Image (spheres, grey):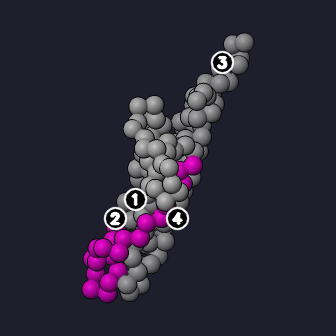
Amino acid sequence: MGMNSFVDSVDLLHRGLDVATLRYQVSANNISMSEVPNYKKQTVNFESELKRAFISRDTQGSAFRMQTSDPSHLESEVPRDWRSVEPRRVTDYVTTSKANGNNVDAEEEAMNITKLQMQYRLLSQLTSFEFSQVKTAIQKL
């Protein structure tokens, strides 16, 4: 599989920006629901699935794969294209931090939002840097 590092880098950065935006929305929603009885906080799962996709791609040549002779047989995990990985909202039903059944820690969510704002700014700067590299290369032609 050919890999265009510029396109892949920009795509990954774009996805990172999208995930940071979704996490920001989820944290803001958690804060707005922090006093609602029995509301359960949400988080966004993305990086662990992305990592699994990269590992499946990197080990596809050496991976042990079972042959299936019947549609009812379990198939071995097929290498997953990392571009197909989407962020997932996950609801935390396990923890309960307040007597009313709500598990949102508004202070923790506010810290998350600050961290996300910094991540977003960094990802934006990295995206800008990727394009400035291409611009520099084009100017030298």
Res 53 visible: no
For the residue pair 38 and 75, the one nearer the viewer reads as 75
Q: Residue at x 44, y 55 (%)?
A: 74
Amino acid, disc 3: Ala
Q: Position of residue 112 (x, y in %)?
A: 40, 59
Amino acid, disc 4: Gln
Callout 4 crowding tier (Cα within 10 Å): few <14, some 14–19, many ≥20: few
**Residue corresponding to mark 1:** 112
Callout 3 crowding tier (Cα within 10 Å): few <14, some 14–19, many ≥20: few
Residue 23 versus residue 123 in the image, above or below: below
Instruction: Report the Cα–Cα distance between label 3 and label 2.
Output: 44 Å
Q: Secondary structure at mark 4?
A: helix
Magenta stretch bounds: 84-107
Q: Circles 2 and 4: CB distance less than 8 Å?
A: no
Amino acid, disc 1: Asn
| Among numbered discs 2 and 4, the one appearing first in the sequence | 4
**Residue corresponding to mark 2:** 108
Where residue 2 sits, quadrant-wise, is top right
Image-based side of 60 in relation to 92, left or right: right
**Residue corresponding to mark 3:** 137
| Among numbered discs 1 and 3, the one appearing first in the sequence | 1
